[in-house]
Image (cartoon, coloured by chain):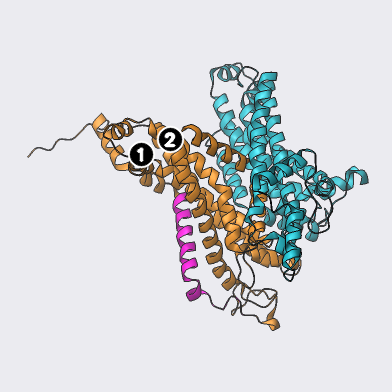
Chain colours: A cyan, B orange
């Protein structure tokens, strides 16, 4: 178990290393000399040279990467070019919002995909199965921010059930917190439910076609009992995998959905950062989002061991 | 002369029937949803090409006396917040959105296909290194990476779509690498090696044609994602710059008038939905047809 988990951790570390190189390398993409950009167009040659030295731009790329990476491991991601605040503090203030949204969306995705996937697996090719597959095809083609706007139109403007925009932390009470997260979580969760629904349908349909399920049927068990007691656990491994893989998708989608609903998370931060061209903050967002994805994948690996102790290797 | 009639279910008859029906395209065209989707894609391509001819108005022509109007004889889909004709903007937007997505798909395939071929065929350290990079790129949330790259390059539609292309390249890489590894073990590739063909010739003449279909499937599915990504990035202000409009940037501007003129929000979203659905339907249909062919070897 420890050896298995250690191997996974090592793999995650390699991925994180490559991601950090890519993230740091983003600076190389900026056209022109960042020192001139910061010093201003009318700066003298000496002033530009001073900025270059201050930013460490006069040293070779690998040296700069090492400095940046060792600082990053200590939790120092530099300061914002816009207001000189430490990047780590900016991220820490916003991460809870994005994580709340992602977890709530994940819950919505499970609430949608579990029943829909099960129902379509009961009779593959039947009317219900085809209807559900049409709905998932529609859901995957819907721009998430558009769905969000439609939800605002219906559930905040026409029928004011939920607040249209904004965020309340959990400390303001569970009711306000949940009400403000509801529409954004549904928006994100619908798209995130598609792959899990398809995966569950395929896995469950395979399981339901096996001999031991036929035996259970022959005993006269209800379909619901068969699925709940016998089949679902065996179909759970691919399902959990897909749910884990959706994390990246969710965090990407969160950028746009947070913007629509005015949630002060990493997504709106990314949007603000774009107009300010604040690269250190943007690098921090990329790293933070990737860390969450890697953590989710490790959690999935652990879940495997619990769901199918013999199989994972 | 005597004609021979075959009994209804001989092996020969089955073989003949299969010959007639078995091509990938005929399998594909038997599906009504795929045919409809192909028709939609054809229509969209025509609109993109002919936008200047068929658009009733200039898409950037403002008419401040007729702002946010509903449908009329002059403006079939009404006007936007600057009095511009919504239908014309949607028609021109087709050109911008599809053109931008095409660029992203070309970048993704242009990076992913050759690297996938090389990694799959040569294996070894190159494969290991490229696959680690692909893993890393795939573990960064796609839209976040696209935003970071596009921001570093500077806001423009071209830069945004280059970024989207980089984000989707590992998808092509994985598909091509996997198919190449399968093909590499085939007898005809060994034969080519034995007869002294160069590595480049083998990859170009023997491997590439045999990994073509999975690439086409990937092109259609990636096109759908690219349209959504373009819309998302334009919505964030990273895509097309005004006064030009793409479907996504039309949505961005319309948000402020959600209460007054919901149609301005609903229409571009609907067009995006239809376009993405069409690309996905063709891609999924192709993939299913391909999977069935592989399951029943003739």
Instruction: Tell me residue A180's x, y (percent).
Output: 83, 50
Q: Say which quadrant the C terminus of chain A sits in.
A: top right
Do the residues at pointers 1 and 2 share their chain? yes
Q: Tell which subunit mark 1 falls on.
A: B
Q: B263 or A122, which lies in front?
A: B263
Q: B111 or A136, which lies in front?
A: B111
On whether residue B20 falls in the magenta region, the answer is: no
Residue A143 appears anywhere in the view? no
Instruction: Tell me residue A37's x, y (percent).
Output: 71, 64
List the residue tagged with mark 2: B122
Residue B188 appears anywhere in the view? yes
Secondary structure of the residue carrying tag 2 is: helix
Which residue is painted at 60% across and 63% down in the image?
Answer: B157
Vertical comparison of A101 with B272: above or below: above
Question: What residue occupies the far left of the structure in this picture?
Answer: B1
Instruction: Tell me residue B260's x, y (percent).
Output: 75, 69
Write down the region rendered in magenta. Answer: B34-61
Q: Is residue B172 left or right of residue B201?
A: right
Q: Quadrant of residue A217?
A: top right
Which residue is painted at 45% across and 45% down in the image?
Answer: B114
The mark found on residue B199 in the picture is 1
Q: Say which quadrant the N terminus of chain A sits in.
A: top right
Among numbered discs 1 and 2, the one appearing first in the sequence: 2
Classify mark 1: residues with Cα within 10 Å, few (<14), some (14-19) or many (20+).
some
């Amino acid at each position: 178990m420890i050896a298995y988990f250690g191997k996974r951790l090592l793999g995650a570390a390699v991925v994180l290393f490559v991601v950090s190189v890519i993230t740091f390398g983003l600076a190389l993409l900026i056209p022109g000399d960042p020192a001139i950009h910061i010093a201003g167009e009318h700066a003298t040659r000496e002033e530009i040279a001073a900025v270059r030295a201050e930013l460490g731009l006069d040293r070779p790329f690998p040296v700069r990467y090492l400095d940046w990476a060792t600082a990053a491991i200590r939790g120092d991601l530099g300061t914002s070019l816009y207001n000189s605040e430490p990047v780590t503090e900016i991220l820490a203030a916003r991460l809870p919002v994005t994580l709340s949204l992602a977890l709530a969306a994940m819950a919505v995705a499970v609430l949608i995909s579990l029943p829909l996937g099960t129902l379509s697996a009961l009779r593959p090719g039947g009317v219900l199965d085809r209807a559900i597959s049409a709905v998932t095809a529609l859901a995957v083609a819907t721009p998430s921010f558009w769905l969000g706007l439609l939800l605002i139109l219906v559930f905040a403007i026409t029928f004011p059930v939920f607040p249209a925009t904004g965020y309340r932390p959990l400390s303001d009470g569970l009711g306000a917190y949940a009400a403000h997260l509801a529409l954004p979580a549904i928006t994100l969760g619908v798209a995130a439910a598609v792959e899990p629904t398809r995966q569950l349908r395929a896995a469950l349909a395979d399981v339901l076609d096996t001999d031991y399920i036929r035996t259970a049927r022959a005993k006269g068990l209800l379909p619901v009992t068969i699925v709940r007691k016998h089949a679902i656990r065996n179909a759970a491994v691919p399902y959990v995998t897909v749910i884990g893989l959706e994390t990246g998708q969710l965090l990407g989608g969160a950028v746009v959905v947070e913007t629509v609903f005015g949630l002060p998370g990493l997504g709106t931060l990314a949007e603000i950062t774009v107009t300010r061209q604040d690269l250190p903050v943007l690098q921090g967002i990329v790293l933070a989002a990737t860390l969450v994805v890697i953590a989710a994948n490790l959690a999935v690996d652990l879940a495997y061991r619990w769901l199918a102790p013999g199989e994972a290797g | 002369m005597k004609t021979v009639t075959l009994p209804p279910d001989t092996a020969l008859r089955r073989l003949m029937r299969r010959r007639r029906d078995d091509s990938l395209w005929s399998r594909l065209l038997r599906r009504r949803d795929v045919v409809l989707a192909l028709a939609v894609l054809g229509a969209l391509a025509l609109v993109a090409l002919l936008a200047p001819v068929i658009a009733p108005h200039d898409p950037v022509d403002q008419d401040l006396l007729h702002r946010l109007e509903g449908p009329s004889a002059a403006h079939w889909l009404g006007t936007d917040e600057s009095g511009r004709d919504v239908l014309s903007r949607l028609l021109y937007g087709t050109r911008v959105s599809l053109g931008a997505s095409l660029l992203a798909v070309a970048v993704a395939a242009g990076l992913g296909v050759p690297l996938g071929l090389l990694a799959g065929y040569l294996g070894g350290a190159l494969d290991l290194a490229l696959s680690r990079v692909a893993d890393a790129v795939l573990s960064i949330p796609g839209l976040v990476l696209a935003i970071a790259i596009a921001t570093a390059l500077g806001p423009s539609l071209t830069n945004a779509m280059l970024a989207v292309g980089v984000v989707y390249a590992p998808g092509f890489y994985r598909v091509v690498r996997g198919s190449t590894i399968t093909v590499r073990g085939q007898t005809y590739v060994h034969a080519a090696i034995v007869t002294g063909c160069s590595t480049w010739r083998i990859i170009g003449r023997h491997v590439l044609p045999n990994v073509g279909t999975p690439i086409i499937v990937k092109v259609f599915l990636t096109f759908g994602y690219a349209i959504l990504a373009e819309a998302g990035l334009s919505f964030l202000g990273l895509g097309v710059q005004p006064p030009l409009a793409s479907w996504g940037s039309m949505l961005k501007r319309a948000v402020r008038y959600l209460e007054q003129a919901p149609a301005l929000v609903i229409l571009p979203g609907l067009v995006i939905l239809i376009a993405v659905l069409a690309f996905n339907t063709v891609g999924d249909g192709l993939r299913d047809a391909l999977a069935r062919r592989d399951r029943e070897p003739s």
